[in-house]
Amino acid sequence: MSALVKSSLKLTMEKYDIISHFMDFLKKYSVPEKGKMTKSIISQNIPYSNRHFDRIFKDFSKYTPFELAEIFRLLCCVESIKRGNTLKNTAYDYDFTPEGLSNALRSKMKIDVKRIRKQDFKFEKHLLISNFMVRLDKYKYQMNKDEFMFLLENLDGEGILAEMSSQNPISEIDKGFELHLAYSKIYDILEKYEGIDINKNTYENIDLQEAIVMHCILLANSQNGTNEFTVRTTELFSTIFLITFFFDVGSLKLENQIYKLFLEHGIKEIFNALKEIKTHTGETFDITLFCYSQCDKVIVQFHPVFKESIIMFKGDTDI
């Protein structure tokens, strides 16, 4: 690994640690005890200026730290009302006026007190803030080691690791291991979700990447006439991992008030090339992911060969 790459990775890890620290701080921050979080409070707990921290944060979220703190405050209000507290008492507890809280719930969350109190309203805990999977660059992710091993077991449980060409599903290499995924099996899964349309308002009111993926899976099932998750838990988590890794979920493009889930051109060309090779020669190859541990984290990225192929197909060297 070159000194430049090491330096870049170290800087990225430092940024991630700062973001993770802020997320943990936000989760533990009690508005009823301490009052609403302000930009001043954020700057007192993060070793950057507000402007610089905003820039760092935008690598990880579509919101600024303060905007995310405000969303978290609203979600805490939703949870309080769901527990049976009145709108008035909840508003005063979380530093709103009753009218201000009611308006914020309607305008930013698209819900009202009546809907919150309905038994069929499900408050999704993972919408608060998630440290599950953090994007480091377009083709690289970092996640908690225990969570990654859980995902790996799910991939294995669904047989995605079982149908390999000439290599074992997992090959140990220096400082890490390679994860070999049968390209046809991956593409069969991804093809079910490519092209799904996500309404602008829906997308902009889903706060986190995993929540968007869950929405896409539910939407695909709805189009098949089920409107519920009918897959096993292991299959669900396998799908979440594959969609999140292979689709650029964090930067969907808006066209005609619709966001569309799509595979990047370079990645799609790799799949097409592997399919063509199999059709004409009978040979089959795996999509290889390189995984290495760093403390209690695992970095997952495309094998350099595939990354170079993506660059070649895409004509983009800024990765």
Image (cartoon, helix red, strand yellow):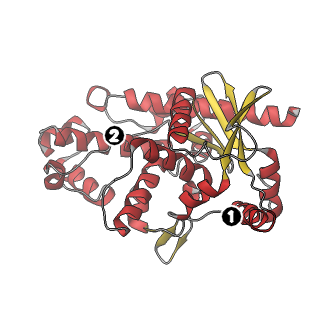
Q: Of marks 2 and 1, which one's residue comes earlier in the chain? A: 2
Give coordinates of residue 66: x percent, y percent: 45, 43
Q: Residue at x 52, y 52 (%)?
A: 62
Say the numbered circle drawn on residue 140. none
- Is residue 149 shown to the viewer in this render? yes
Give coordinates of residue 217: x percent, y percent: 42, 57
Instruction: Pick the residue in front: 157 or 270.
Output: 157
For mark 1, does the 10 Å Cα neighbourhood hold few (<14), some (14 to 19), or many (20 or more) residues? some
Q: Residue at x 26, y 30 (%)?
A: 32
Residue most extreme to the top: 295
As helix, strand or loop, the secondary structure at mark 1 comes to helix
Say the numbered circle drawn on residue 125. 2
Q: Residue at x 57, y 46 (%)?
A: 160
Q: Amino acid at mark 2?
A: Lys
Q: Quadrant of the N terminus?
A: top right
Give coordinates of residue 247: x percent, y percent: 59, 57
Q: Quadrant of residue 68?
A: top left
Cα gap from disc 2 to disc 1, whole angstroms: 34 Å
Q: Amino acid at mark 1?
A: Lys
Q: Which residue is mark 1?
A: 268
